[in-house]
Image: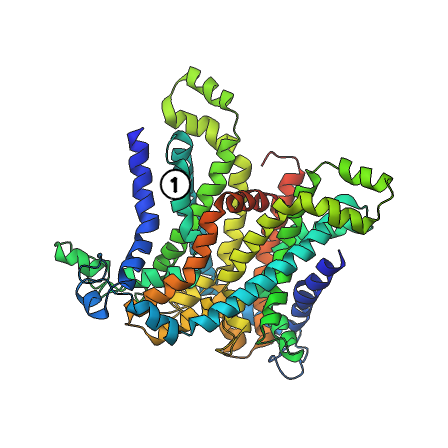
Amino acid sequence: MWPAYAVLTVLGVFSIGPIVVLVFNSLKTDVEIGTNPLGPPLHHLSLRNFSQAWHQGAIGTTMLNSAIITLGTVVGVCFIAGLAAYALARLDLAGGTLVLGYLLFGTALPAQLFLVPLFSLWSRIGLYDTRLGLIIIYWAIFSPFATLLMRSFLISLPRDFEDAARTDGSRELYVLTRIVLPLAWPGLLTVALIAGLTAWNEFFFAVTFIQSSDKLPVVTSFLAFSQNYTRYWGLTCAAAIIIVLPVLFVFLALQRRFVEGLSSGGLKG
Amino acid sequence: MAPLILVNVVVIVGPSIAAVYYSFTNWDGISAAHWTGLANFRRLLHDGEFRTGLEHNLEWTAMFLTVPIAMGLLGAFLLSQIKRFRLLFRTIFFIPYVIASVVNAFIWQIILDPQQGIGSQLQRIDIGWLNGVAFFGDVNLALPAVAFVDNWHFWGFLVVLFLAAMQSIPTELYEAQRVDGGGRWAEFWHVTLPGIRPTLVFVVVIVTIWSFLTFDYVYIITQGGPGGATDTAATLLYRTMFSYNEAGYAASMGLALALVSVVVTLAYAYVKRRGWDV
């Protein structure tokens, strides 16, 4: 077995080593980085980079922006995908097959195709350079995979409870909120996790649709920050760690659900 | 279902249809568009920059269909063989995938820095051949270097996909192979690979599509430079739209790119429909 562990360890060092360098550098002064750019901090550990990065990078503001964008995306995607998945899995609506076909094949349409007209539309209706505008885009691009994931989750749930409630004379809305929702929440949590992490990290639309520095999410503001402070590695590394920590924390706490959702949702899409 | 249809029509379907129209015009993104027929497409066919960009996409596809898939298969197969620390290794491999592209790019800009990066550190222990090499600044190295960074963050995702598929292979198949003998290599070749074929084909499809659309890491690290050495179709489209304000021409590029992904997707759907077990 040991050759397997040896190779896996090499691969593991390859994956995590560069991140360790990032942590090392965030704890060093720039003087020390000059003589010791990649190794562990040998002199006094300093947390000054973190407080300085927090202020100079306005990370308080950008974190709040990212939190608003992420939360808005998650709530919206769960609402949109949850309703649509329920309709597709349980109600025999006309056009259901057409929508399903769109979800499966329409997602092959790349962002590069609709970017140009979308940009001009968003500028004209005042959604350009607003957090809401970005959130709406995320609703649209994340909802197809989320709907498919929720649909397969709902199909795997037994219908007995719903049918029993219906024969008791409950209304559809009651069935949906009181019976389906409590059963479906693990699926919704998976959808929320994937949509949330993707929204937090998303780059392409964020860099295109948000310009004002007070509305930038952490990702694009970090890019600007790292370009402004090119040789200030300690500072930039600290900023990087601050914006990565929330994601890493959520991922490590809930990784099983996240990984399951990605592998199953990805494969069916 | 109404909210789903509404946001998708407003954000994706509507603008996609508009893009088809604009690709036949000389639209600048602001003023009125004028119909110019096939002019954009004629120009696209003879656009040397765009052709070079597409060649970079092809190179990118070739790199991504080999390196991350081989690494993903290796990692997943080894993980499927061991008993302890499986979750730990899977977590470690996956961590770069959940970190934002801007941070990953920055980490490697530090490590591959020509003055203070890995080359100069190796120089100290007398390994000098990487010293002073500007990985992202060299015309010949830039594209593979950017692809390397993207792959570093991506391959762990494939480990997770492949491992999930491998774990659903019935153990009886492995036992039968063990009777035939041949060791682990034979197990991998005759049981594991055929067992995960649907996942493998799916990965080939998405990797091909994503390779033709690749944008983030190129835009963040090199913006297409030096001298267009890392330009891909997507970065060219972006520049055409936002630096040159040639929205109509950019739309025709987008249409060309959409064609690639739609053709690949339809081919995949067709093969699946024919009932081939992929």
Q: Does residue B140 appear in the picture of this structure?
A: no
Q: How packed is label 1: few (under 14 Cα within 10 Å), some, or many (20 or more)?
A: few
Q: Position of residue A130 (x, y in %)?
A: 59, 75
Q: Is residue A237 above or below residue A122?
A: above
Residue at x 47%, y 18% (from the top left corner): B176
Secondary element type, mark 1: helix
Which residue is the extreme one toward the bottom? B31
Q: How is the image coloured?
A: rainbow
Which residue is the extreme one toward the top? B179
Res B41 quadrant in image: bottom right
Q: Does residue B124 appear in the picture of this structure?
A: yes
In the figure, is residue A36 to the left or right of A125? left
Image quadrant for the N terminus of chain A? top left
In the figure, is residue B270 to the left or right of A14? right
In the figure, is residue A236 to the left or right of B207? left
Q: To which residue does mark 1 refer?
A: B88
Q: Position of residue B26 (x, y in %)?
A: 62, 78
- For the residue pair A95 and A13, the one nearer the viewer reads as A13
- For the residue pair A235 and B20, the one nearer the viewer reads as A235
Q: Position of residue B152 (x, y in %)?
A: 38, 52
Q: Amino acid at mark 1?
A: Leu
In the figure, is residue A223 to the left or right of A88? left
